[in-house]
């Protein structure tokens, strides 16, 4: 009989992915965090050109120098001062998160995780031997980080803090004042901040503020998937102090070697091009955000207006628990995600997550259906 690692046996499969197994030809899928638009043609052509030019071999472990230089230049727009030697190109931001958790978490370390927050933070912490601890984000705070709450949750065992702005699942954006205060609190308590910024471009009324603007020792993670509709190309990246990158590189060398060479060439082209595609994309997503917000405005469903990403986290408690509501919606061929997947706070059971990065027809069906169930 096979014996499995106890820490892996205790891990639960992704509740989100289980729902996707129920997708049929007529199903409206508002569960998947993936853009409904295609990778721009100029990026596709760059990938094809890379194949034709023979870029089908390994690259340097850290990634192509041209791409790391492009990332360095790109990050200056967020006042992040880095250089190509302080960057590792990864197979998606997911690998970057894995590198970070393996590098900074020891057995028994406490890790503060936004609650509600991205589903991968807790299991990645457990795989690294850490203990996930919730950092409550409250509806009355518009799901933004509250520095006073952070102070209350810090103990002598707290070693790492995850930040995610714009947020998955809420669409909230932390304001500069609170971000700066958070970096100062973390510094005072010798806590490493892992800042997941994959939605940094997808902001509607404001602009993105990175914690690394206030502290160069922040671990910043980003990628190409969401902004450029490159989810299948698997390109992310992580930037950190040089000595930290040297530690992460050891893990990256053994589990990945390098990110896909063809995708790296395409990503470099994407970052060196103008931003018209991004501007058009954000305008379209903003229209869909407004459609959802206005459609639910005068109903029993409460919704804090999303400020970024392409998610909404409505309070559907008047219709039942999160599982009851998602079940009723599924009976009407609409997939959404129960809020309990995003944290341990009981209040998450009042919410569901929807992705509005889909067509307006499907969004209108959701608005109409949820009012009837």
Image (cartoon, rainbow, N blue to C red):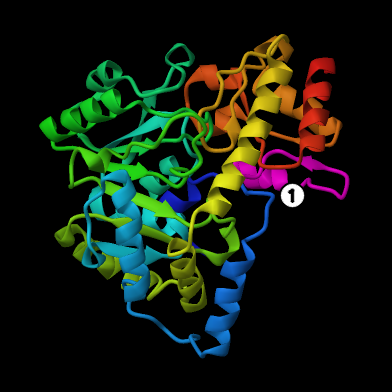
User: Residue 244: which quarter of the image?
Assistant: bottom left
Check if residue 29 falls in the magenta segment: yes
User: Residue placed at 47% from the left, 63% from the top?
Assistant: 273
Region in magenta: 15-33
- Examine the rendered structure and indicate whether residue 228 appears above or below residue 214: below
Q: Which residue is mark 1?
A: 21
Check if residue 199 falls in the magenta segment: no
Position of residue 25 measured from the top left corner of the image (x, y, whole percent): 87, 50
Badge 1, how many Cα within 10 Å: few under 14, some, many 20+? Answer: few
Position of residue 302 measured from the top left corner of the image (x, y, whole percent): 63, 13
Left or right: where does residue 268 sit relative to residue 46?
left
Position of residue 330 measured from the top left corner of the image (x, y, whole percent): 80, 33
Q: Nearer the viewer, residue 180 or 66?
A: 66
User: Residue 340: which quarter of the image?
Assistant: top right
Whether residue 357 can be seen here: yes
Question: From the image, which quarter does the N terminus lie in?
Answer: bottom right
Taking the view exactly as shown, the residue that stands out farthest to the left is 188
User: Residue placed at 58% from the left, 88% from the top?
Assistant: 52
User: Residue 90: which quarter of the image?
Assistant: bottom left
User: Residue placed at 42% from the left, 59% from the top?
Assistant: 95
Left or right: where does residue 68 sit relative to residue 9?
left
Q: Nearer the viewer, residue 42 or 122?
A: 42
Position of residue 66 measured from the top left corner of the image (x, y, whole percent): 35, 74
- Examine the rendered structure and indicate whether residue 58 appears above or below residue 180: below
- Examine the rendered structure and indicate whether residue 28 appears above or below residue 151: below
């Amino acid at each position: 009989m096979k014996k499995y690692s106890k820490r892996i046996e205790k891990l639960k499969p992704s509740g989100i992915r289980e729902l996707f197994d129920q997708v049929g030809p007529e199903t409206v899928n508002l569960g998947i965090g993936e853009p409904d638009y295609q990778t721009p043609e100029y990026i596709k052509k760059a990938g094809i050109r890379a194949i034709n030019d023979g870029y089908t071999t390994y690259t340097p472990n850290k990634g192509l120098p041209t791409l790391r230089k492009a990332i360095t230049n790109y990050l200056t727009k967020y006042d992040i001062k880095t250089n190509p030697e302080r960057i590792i190109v990864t197979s998606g931001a997911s690998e970057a998160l894995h590198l970070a958790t393996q590098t900074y978490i020891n057995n028994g370390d406490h890790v503060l995780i936004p609650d509600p927050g991205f589903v991968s933070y807790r299991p990645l912490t457990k795989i690294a031997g850490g203990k996930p601890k919730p950092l409550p984000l409250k509806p009355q705070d518009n799901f933004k980080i509250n520095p006073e709450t952070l102070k209350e949750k810090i103990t002598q065992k707290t070693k790492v803090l995850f930040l995610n702005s714009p947020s998955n699942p809420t669409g909230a954006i932390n304001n500069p004042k609170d971000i700066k205060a958070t970096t100062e609190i973390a510094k005072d308590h010798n806590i490493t901040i892992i800042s997941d910024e994959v939605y940094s471009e997808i902001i509607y009324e404001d602009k993105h503020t990175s914690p690394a603007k206030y502290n160069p020792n922040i671990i910043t993670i980003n990628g190409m998937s969401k902004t450029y509709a490159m989810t299948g190309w698997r390109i992310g990246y992580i930037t950190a102090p040089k000595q930290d990158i040297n530690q992460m590189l050891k893990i990256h060398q053994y589990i990945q070697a390098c990110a896909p060479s063809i995708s790296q060439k395409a990503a470099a082209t994407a970052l060196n091009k103008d931003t018209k595609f991004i501007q058009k994309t954000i305008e379209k997503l903003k229209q869909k955000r407004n459609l959802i917000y206005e459609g639910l405005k005068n109903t029993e469903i409460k919704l804090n207006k999303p400020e970024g990403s392409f998610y909404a986290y409505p309070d559907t408690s008047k219709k039942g628990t999160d599982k009851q509501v998602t079940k009723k919606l599924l009976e009407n061929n609409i997939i959404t995600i129960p809020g309990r997947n995003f944290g341990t706070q009981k209040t998450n059971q009042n919410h569901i997550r929807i992705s509005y990065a889909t067509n307006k027809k499907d969004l209108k069906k959701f608005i109409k259906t949820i009012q009837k169930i």
